[in-house]
């Protein structure tokens, strides 16, 4: 792991985006149940993993009784 970035929405820790050794691929390590479907997903330089994770969190939250993000 070369560097990492925490992903959180309104104080809810969702996981971490990790920069891989090739310096162009980023991988998401999910820590929150609502985004487990993205665990170990790989993103290219042009992808926005934080936006992807946030969208899944908000969509899943709406289906679970309105969890807010």
Image (spheres, grey):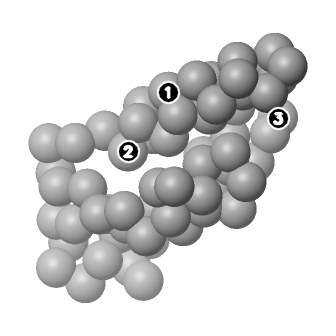
Please give the name of the residue rendered at 36% of the width and 62% of the height, measured from the top-left corner: 41
Secondary-structure class at tag 2: helix
Secondary-structure class at tag 1: helix
Q: CA distance from mark 2 to mark 3?
A: 18 Å
Q: Position of residue 22 (x, y in %)?
A: 16, 79
Q: Nearer the viewer, mark 1 or mark 3?
A: 1
Return the residue at label 3: 11
Return the residue at label 2: 49
Q: Does residue 23 sit above or below 54 in this rendering? A: below
Q: Position of residue 47 (x, y in %)?
A: 22, 42
Q: Nearer the viewer, mark 2 or mark 1?
A: 1
Tell which circle, 2 or 1, labels the residue nearer the N-terminal end. Answer: 2
Q: Position of residue 14 (x, y in %)?
A: 68, 49
Secondary-structure class at tag 3: loop
Return the residue at label 1: 55
Q: Which mark is residue 42?
A: none
Residues marked 1 and 3 touching at CB (< 8 Å)? no
Quarter in which the N terminus is drawn: bottom left
Please give the name of the residue rendered at 62% of the width and 24% of the height, measured from the top-left corner: 58
- Tally the marks: 3
Please give the name of the residue rendered at 38% of the width and 45% of the height, measured from the top-left corner: 49
Left/right placement of residue 3 relative to residue 23 reads right
Q: CA distance from mark 2 to mark 1?
A: 10 Å
């Amino acid at each position: 792991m070369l560097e990492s970035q925490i992903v959180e929405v309104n104080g809810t820790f969702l996981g971490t985006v990790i920069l891989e050794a090739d310096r162009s691929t980023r991988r998401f390590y999910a820590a929150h149940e609502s985004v487990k479907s993205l665990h170990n997903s790989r993103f290219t330089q042009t992808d926005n993993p934080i936006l992807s994770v946030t969208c899944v969190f908000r969509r899943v939250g709406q289906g679970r009784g309105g969890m807010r993000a």
